Image (spheres, rainbow, N blue to C red):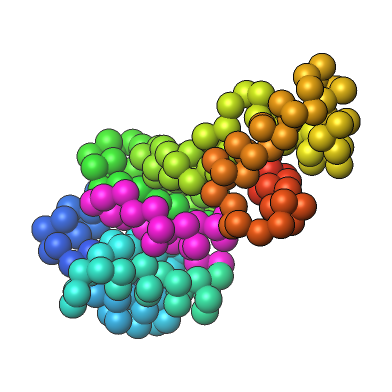
Amino acid sequence: MVERRARITLAEDDVLLRAGLASLLERSGFEIVAQAGDGEELIAAVREHQPDVAIVDIRMPPAYETEGLDAAQVIRQEFPSIGILLLSAHVEVDQATELLAAGQRVGYLLKSRVTEVSEFIETVERIAQGGSVVDPGLVQELLTARHKDDPLESLTEREREVLALMAEGRSNAGIANRLWITEGTVEKHVRSILARMQLPETEDDHRRVLAVITFLDNR
């Protein structure tokens, strides 16, 4: 029994790049069932051919913003079993995360990786088989973004210890006994924690609760 070739729809507005990718994929054993130059053509092609994988440039005509990504989201809603590989010239964290959160049969690759032929082909194969692939460049950007947005990042080691004990429901006196420091020192740490975390000026008890919730959410 001959194994069926994975069927690909390719969406890329750069005609030369699209032709090059189509040729590469065909030589690597895939079947190109349709090609598209913008989001509308892509959606129409997918509806007609229902490929195994849609390879989609995130930015396409007319505005070169998120037309490809928008089309990919329509495809995912209408045909959740079709794999989607997003291609982008630049790391675009905010735009891609919602689709990538689906977790299955989805990938994100920088166009610079396409020149690494074996890696590109392996990526397409993995998505066709139900897997997911995320470009290391995007992973690094996500980690960096999370690091920048971490509200606990500015806390000292001692302040983290105090906040962890606050999360256990301990009073200032209880924290002081646990850390072998004075209650006045604990109060100073608590004030510093609330200030560093930029919590709104409200009653101290409420701000303590907000601090604890933030701590638990970022563990």
Q: Is residue 199 magenta?
A: no
**Most distant residue in the left direction:** 16
Residue 81 % position (x, y): 56, 67
Q: Is residue 88 left or right of residue 108?
A: left
Residue 83 % position (x, y): 48, 61
Q: Is residue 117 left or right of residue 135?
A: left
Residue that appears at 26% across and 50% down? 90
Q: Is residue 111 left or right of residue 150?
A: left
Residue that appears at 48% across and 52% down? 127
Q: Is residue 125 in view?
A: no
Quadrant in which residue 176 is drawn: top right
Along the line of sight, the residue nearer the viewer: 217 or 110: 217
**Most distant residue in the top direction:** 180
Q: Is residue 94 magenta?
A: yes
Q: Is residue 64 left or right of residue 66?
A: left
Along the line of sight, the residue nearer the viewer: 143 or 211: 211
Specify the segment rendered in magenta: 81-103
As drawn, 16 above or below 187: below
Q: Is residue 80 in view?
A: yes
Residue 24 % position (x, y): 25, 49
Along the line of sight, the residue nearer the viewer: 133 or 117: 133
Report the number of discs.
0
As drawn, 157 above or below 211: above
Residue that appears at 47% across and 57% down? 97
Along the line of sight, the residue nearer the viewer: 129 or 70: 70
Residue 147 % position (x, y): 48, 39
* Image quarter of the C terminus: top right
